[in-house]
Image (cartoon, rainbow, N blue to C red):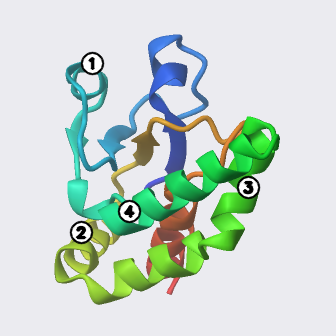
Amino acid sequence: MTGTLADTYVAALQHDTADVPADATLVGVVRRPTGWFSATVDENVPALAPPEPLLDDAKAREEELEADGVDGAEANRRAWADVEFAARYRDHLDADSDARQAVEDLADRLAGGESLALVCFENTEEKRCHRTILRERLAERVDG
């Protein structure tokens, strides 16, 4: 029996508004977890965070757009498109050996029946987040 796969952000967990199965292992997918983040999740897998150059490019583009008067959520969406965030993150998951192994490990856990919830900082109602791409990738791996 395959486990369930969900994703959420840390503030939703802290405020008890996250929609994740009660038995799900909370798997952080951030490069540099804060102490309060680490206290909220069961584990963190930094290899599944976007690579630093990608994060830097997206942040710089978002700041440029905001300086030009584009509001935060729209600046985030446009920055993602402008720096080809989704494609570059998928490439990272495929090309980086640590990321590939981490995806395999989580897929194996799901296939073995463990329920997982991917967690990072971004509220996807406001901004885009890599964990939604990672969730799709894991679902593809488990569903075959």
Residue reaching furthest to the front? 68
Helix, strand or loop at label 2? It is: helix
Amino acid on which disc 1 is placed: Trp
Question: Which mark is nearer the camera, 1 or 3?
Answer: 3
Asked if the residue at tag 3 contacts the one at tag 2, i.e. Cβ–Cβ closer than 8 Å, the answer is no
Residue at mark 2 to residue at mark 3: CA–CA distance = 27 Å
Residue reaching furthest to the top? 15
Residue with the mark numbered 3? 77
Identify the residue at image location x=37%, y=79%.
Answer: 92
Q: In this view, does 111 lie above or below 119?
A: below
Residue with the mark numbered 1? 36
Using residue 73 as the reference point, say whether residue 60 is left or right of it. left
- Mark 4 or mark 2, which is nearer the start of the sequence? 4
Asked if the residue at tag 1 contacts the one at tag 4, i.e. Cβ–Cβ closer than 8 Å, the answer is no
Q: Looking at the rendered structure, which numbered label has been put on residue 102?
A: 2
Residue at mark 2 to residue at mark 4: CA–CA distance = 13 Å
